Image (cartoon, grey):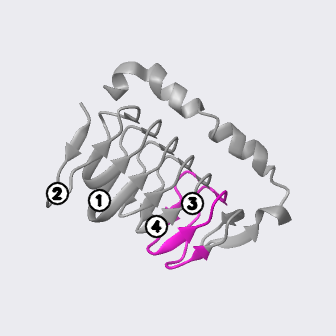
Amino acid sequence: MVRTYGFEGGEPSVHEDAHVCREATVVGDVEIEADASVWPGAVLRGDVAPVRVGRESHVGDNAVLHASTVGDRVMVGHGAVLNDAEVGDGSLVGFNATINSDVRIGERSIVAAGTVTLESADIPPESFVRGVPARVTPLSETTIDAEEIFESYSSGEYTGLAKRHGTLFE
């Protein structure tokens, strides 16, 4: 059974086709859409503002989403922290990245593992973000094969993996 908790009238809403691990914690005004997955140790806390996880998006082990929105087909890596942030459709947030308050990450962007954004950053679509503090480079100016990366994590593999785990998500 998933650990869900209401908070001041806000109740979690998990689509019947979503996969939320019973070891995740979901509090308050949280919406998890179809074919999304939330993995062990993740915390989604919609107490001071809503948390939204879009269709076919995946929140990795031990990630924390507080008052944040994740668009469709987004991968949030293990240990990432999003606080009052918005991640556009088709983006990737790497392992242990920290996305600080009032940050907006544009569609189809890649945030490298370990990156720390400054507060109130507005990252354009199709950007590569890396470093501490984060530096932004248009994907078109890198040697990164963005299409290969996007295809590998947004292909539905995580949805299939969640289904294969069975009782972890019951």
Q: Earlier in the sequence, mark 3 or mark 1?
A: 1
For label 4, the residue is: 85
Asked whether disc 3 touches disc 1, contact meaning CB atoms under 8 Å apart, the reply is no
Residue found at the far bottom of this picture: 120
Q: Is residue 114 left or right of residue 45?
A: right
Mark 3–mark 2 Cα distance, whole angstroms, equals 26 Å
Say if 64 sits above or below 103 in the image: above
Give the amino acid type for the residue marked by disc 2 in the picture: Phe
**Which secondary structure lies at badge 1?**
strand
For label 3, the residue is: 88
For label 1, the residue is: 46
> In the rendering, at what x and y percent does residue 60 appear?
47, 43
Mark 4–mark 2 Cα distance, whole angstroms, equals 20 Å
Mark 3–mark 1 Cα distance, whole angstroms, equals 19 Å
Within-10-Å neighbours for mark 1: few <14, some 14–19, many 20+: many
Q: Can residue 111 be seen at all in this image of the molecule?
A: no
Q: Residue at x 40, y 32 (%)?
A: 17
Residue 83 lies in magenta, yes or no? no
Q: Earlier in the sequence, mark 4 or mark 2?
A: 2
Q: Earlier in the sequence, mark 3 or mark 2?
A: 2
**Which secondary structure lies at badge 3?**
loop
Give the amino acid type for the residue marked by disc 4 in the picture: Ala
Residue 110 lies in magenta, yes or no? yes
Q: Can residue 40 be seen at all in this image of the molecule?
A: yes
Mark 2–mark 1 Cα distance, whole angstroms, equals 8 Å
For label 2, the residue is: 7
Magenta region: 93-122
Q: Earlier in the sequence, mark 1 or mark 4?
A: 1
Within-10-Å neighbours for mark 2: few <14, some 14–19, many 20+: some
